[in-house]
Amino acid sequence: MILMLQKNTPEPAIRQLLAQLSLQNVKGGCVAGDNAILLPLVGETWRLDPSALQALPFVMEARRLTPAYRLAGRTAHPENTVVTVGDVSVGADFCLIAGPCAVESAYQMDTLSRAVKDAGAQLLRGGVFKPRTSPYTFQGMGEPGVDLLVQAGRNAGLPTVTEISDASQMELLSGVDVWQVGTRNMQNFTLLKALGQVRKPILLKRGAAATVEELLLAAEYILSGGNEQVILCERGIRSGLTAARAALDVSSIPVLKRLTHLPVIVDPSHAAGRADLVEPLALAAVAAGADGLLVEVHDRPATALSDGAQALTPAQLTQLAEKTARLRAALA
Ligand code: PEP
Ligand code: MN
């Protein structure tokens, strides 16, 4: 980080500022120029808040040279992180996660788990605690749905993914292989801190109104607790202008791949909101370098209890998986 001070800053004020910074394990030099005094800072600068520093007397500007997400960033960790889930190496091998928005019945999970396995998916998803915009819509099966998901995954030989919306669900969801943090909870810092204490892969979705930096700082909460198994997921952001449910931020994929070593997957389903847009968005994500896809599927989309409009049929998922493989081969 670098601080730019007014050229007339008195020496005692500089000394006091540096002494204050040293309490946060930051040390600095001092270079006097004709128009300003520069203080280059080194040490634990990720603890500093540039806007707070800028509010101090004599400070004209505080600029970060290294990101505040020091654990999620590539600077301190250049090689890709690979998150291992069963036989699946997310971040090394391309990964397709598929399943219904919500677990609805044993029959549905049995049908869909086989179908997504046949289509080539490596992980089975299904929500049991559904964060819905309206309290009057289906909220998920809750506890009875957990066994249906785990059992279906076991029968099909697929590890499972479900959303955790509160730390109190940890014990109940302990048999599920990956815990998803939904877009609405990306900045639920109490939940993120609790997830930092477990040793379980976390699929962290980008908040619908969050910047890439905020996503990385949310991941930092989990990493700084000691849990290194974090998968990031772009799922569309709010623009108010798109014809789809959300605007899939395709540019975030190469940007994240450059800034962080964590795997980056894409959920085209929640960005699309409509089944016909899922395939083009998924292919755009693959072309942009996504490490995997998370896709909602339903055996009878018209009867789905949540997100039926965006659900692919198993046949459509198979077609998407085939096109994805062809696109990846063409780009290799
Ligand atoms: C989901 O994956 O089921 C979900 C609710 O996604 P999001 O949090 O991205 O809306
Ligand atoms: Mn959904």
Image (tube, helix red, strand yellow):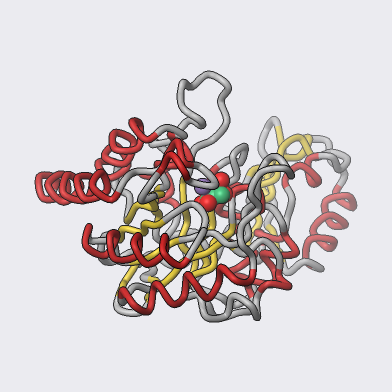
Q: Inspect this view and state whether residue 144 appears.
A: yes
Q: Is residue 95 left or right of residue 232?
A: left
Q: Is residue 64 left or right of residue 83?
A: right
Q: Is residue 30 left or right of residue 104?
A: right
Q: Quadrant of residue 263?
A: bottom left
Pick the front one: 315 or 48:
315
Q: Quadrant of residue 114?
A: bottom left
Q: Inspect this view and state whether residue 65 appears.
A: no
Relative image position of residue 151 (x, y in whole percent)? 44, 77
Relative image position of residue 17 (x, y in whole percent)? 83, 54
Q: Quadrant of residue 238?
A: top right
Pick the front one: 211 or 7:
211
The residue sitting at 42% across, 47% down in the picture is: 267
The residue sitting at 88% across, 57% down in the picture is: 16
Numbered circles on residues, count: 0
The residue sitting at 66% across, 37% down in the picture is: 33
Does residue 267 lie above or below 180 as drawn?
above
Does residue 48 lie above or below 91 as drawn?
above
Relative image position of residue 97 (x, y in whole percent)? 36, 59
Relative image position of residue 3 (x, y in whole percent)? 70, 45
The residue sitting at 76% across, 35% down in the picture is: 60
